[in-house]
Each structure stands twice: as structure tokens, then as C-alpha cells.
Image: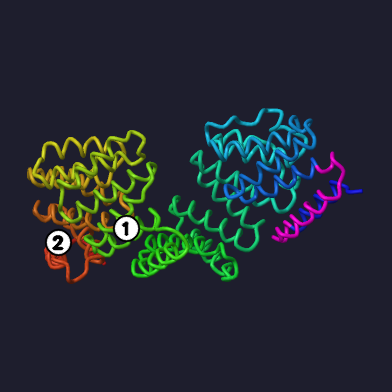
Amino acid sequence: MIDVATTWGQACAALAEGDYDTAFDVLEAAMSEARRPERARIALYLASTHALYGDAATAEVGAALREARTLDPSLRADPLYLALSAELDARSRGPDAVPPTPAVREAAEPLARYHALGALALGEHPQEALDIHLPLTELPPHLRWRLRSWQADGEEQLGHLEEAAHLYAEAAHHARGLNRAIMLQEGAATLLQLGQTEGAQAALDGARPLYTGQDPEEGLNLATWHYLNAQALLALDKPEAALEAIREADRLEREHGDPSYGVALVWGQVLTHLGQHERALEHFEAALSVSTDADRHYALHELGVALLDLDRPVEARERLEAVLADPDYPYQPEVLADLAECDYRLGRLQEAQQTAEQALAQGAVVPASLVLGSVALDYYHLDDALEHYERVVREAAPDSRDWITGHQMAADVMAQQGFKDPAAAYAHAQQALEHTPESDDWHITLQDHLRKAEALMGQGGGRMLN
């Protein structure tokens, strides 16, 4: 006689070791020997096991569920059957799927609650998924990392990135092999969004040794590793290493699949950082050509900025206006600031000022202030210009290009004002000079400002700055 609980326990033990073949062998052997009611229950466990393959096994899940209800029609009311059916429906129809009922979400069987949670996550009901009570210890080991992954995805959908990062780290702790690498990479992606580059790099460093070259599914996941590594390296101001990483990501994508929007976009960003704007433009256009509706406006925005970098404001404005037409695009204030820059380059000072003030009010402080500073200088409103550039220095990331520009321009405006505050002018010039290469025209100008400010400070008996 086949004992269903024992059979499922044996299958779970194999799944915990990543031995899917043995798990299926155990379940299918039991199906051939068990009586009809037990076979129906085992069919549900087969459906649960097939469901681990996600979208690739929807046909197998559907077939197992059909067999289960054929063997025992009463299973149509069983919470596990209903949860698996809801998950299958959500994989097919997304948010249009019928979510599992409260009775299924609160079922006594943990496996039913697990699949109900998956159905809610796939159906874009993240908070309802997170509300399901499911202690980790109630699940077999092979589902524990997957539970944390579903929960991390839910937190991410809700914009709770810190919580998502912690859950991905916990998922990685419970996963093994390639699955562990994937969870570490998901966590790294979340940390990159949070600006926690060192944490992201640590997660990536932990993931890389898990690639052994033995698993046929490694190729595209390793491409993702290089793609994320390129982003981390770029954030750490290592653009040459980032370029090497993104090239490898592209090579692996082409070898194992198709070129992606993300890789093309990051490649363009790396080239922009290296000042290779024409080549960057090619990659941004490639990103746009393979983008989905959800990604299209991000690619258009990058394309618009790249055209601005090439001093092609008319073309840039066309792309940026298309982005602004999407009210759901999350970086609308930055787009407004970029449009203000287009107007400034086209000599439309009044329009540039109005749009930049709108961008500033909506939170795009640094790019809007740079435009407002330029407009004020053109009107020779030096006090206003200085106020805008000092705001840039306060708000921009230290050592960033905008921060350096803010210091350069603040020093230059103070020079035009006649060094009324030589100590402040000296400080701005000194900060800018430390980050300005000798080949840059600004280097000589800043050295001149530094000498004049220093001389005036000496005449006034002020303390010399180091």
C-alpha cells in the first residue's frame, strides 16, 4: 500500500537536494501503484512539483490537475487543488486572473497557502500575498527560498526596496547552487536601486563562484551577473571595467538568447561616462528598438540626454517630449529639467527658466539649478546665478560631474563679482581643481581664480586655507 505522506516526504527530500529527476520518479512510481484516491492526491503533488518550473511547465501543471480531478472529482473543492489552479490561471492571465478565495489563503495545509501566495503575487496583488500567514518552518526545505523570493517580489512591487533586499538575502541563505546565485543577484539589483553599491558588489562577489559551467541554465543568468556587475562598477567610478563587464554580458546574451534592452541601455550609460557620446547613442537606439512598452520611455529619456550631450537639442527635445507625454513615467521632473536645457541651448531663455523652475519645484533640484544658473548668467544676474550653483554643490553627490560643475561655476561667478568673499571663492576653486584634469580648459581658469583669491586673503590678513 502506498502512503501518500511518505511518498511526498521522499519527493521533498530529493527536491531539497536539487534532484528533480528522483522526485518525479518517486511520485510517478507511486502513481502507478497507488489506489485511485491516493493517486489523485499524488497528482496534486506532481502539479506542485511541475509548478517549480514556472511558465515553462504550465501544460504539465494543467495535465496533472486534470488527472487529479478525473481520479477524484471531490478534489475540485480541495484547497491545494484550488491554489494550484489559481496559480496556473495567474501565470496565464496575470492581473485578469481570479485570485484565490480567503478560505484557500487560510487553508490548514501550508502547501496550499504557498501556492495561493504565488497566485496572488503573479496576479499583481502583492499586499494580499504578503498578508498570507506562512511560517518558513511549515514548508519543506525546497520551498523555503522560493517563499522568501515571492515575498521579496511583493515588497519590491510595493516599492519597499529595503525589505525586498533583506528577503532576497534570506532567500539566498536557504537556496543552493544556481538558485542561490540568482537570489544573490536579485538582491544585488535591489541594492543598486537603493544606491548601496558596496552591498550589491558583495552580493555579486558571493554569486560568481556558484557558476560551475555544469548547468545548461547558467548562460543567461551569468549574463545577468555581468550586467549587474557593470552597473556596480560604473557606480564605483570604474567605467573601463564596467565596459568590459557589459561586453561580456552582451556576448553571453547573444550566445544563449537574444540581446536585451537592459544590456544595451547600460552599455550606452557606460560609454556616456567615458565621453563616447556617438557610440553611446547607438546603444541607446538599440535599447529603444528592443524595449517593451514598460521600458520604452526609459530608453527615450536616455536617448534624449545622449542627444543633448552631442549638442543636438532639437532631436533631444523630440524624444523628451514623447517621454513627458507619459504621466506614469517616474522621472518627469528630470525630463522637465532636460527640456529646459534644450530650450537654453536653443536660446529660448524665458522658456528655459520657466521649465527649469517647474522642474525645481517638482524635485529635480540639481539639473534644474544648473539650467537656472546658466540663464541667470546670460542675464548677468550674478547673485542669482551664485545661489543656483551653490545649491548644486549642496545637493549633488560629492565628486559627481554636477558637483564639480557647481564648484567650477560658483568660483567663476565669484571671480566675476570681484572676489567679494575670497575665502569662499578659494574653497570652490580648490574643490573644483582637485577634480579637473590638466587637459581641461577649466584647469587654467581655476588656477587663476585660486591665485587671485589667495592674494586677496593674504592682503586681508585672513587665515590661509590648505
For the point 54% across and 50% down, the residue is 165
**Placement of the C terminus among the 4 image quadrants:** bottom left
Does 346 sit left or right of 211 as displayed? left
First to last magenta residue range = 15-39
Q: Quadrant of residue 346?
A: top left
From the image, give the main secondary structure of the stretch colored magenta.
Answer: helix
Tag 1, which secondary structure? helix
**Residue where numbered disc 1 is placed:** 269
Tag 2, which secondary structure? helix
Neighbourhood count class around disc 2 (C-alpha, 10 Å): few under 14, some 14–19, many 20 upward? many
Q: How is the image coloured?
A: rainbow
Residue sitting nearer the eye, 255 or 188: 255
Residue sitting nearer the eye, 371 or 336: 336
**Percent of width and height locating residue 161:** 50, 46
Neighbourhood count class around disc 1 (C-alpha, 10 Å): few under 14, some 14–19, many 20 upward? many
**Percent of width and height locating residue 264:** 35, 57
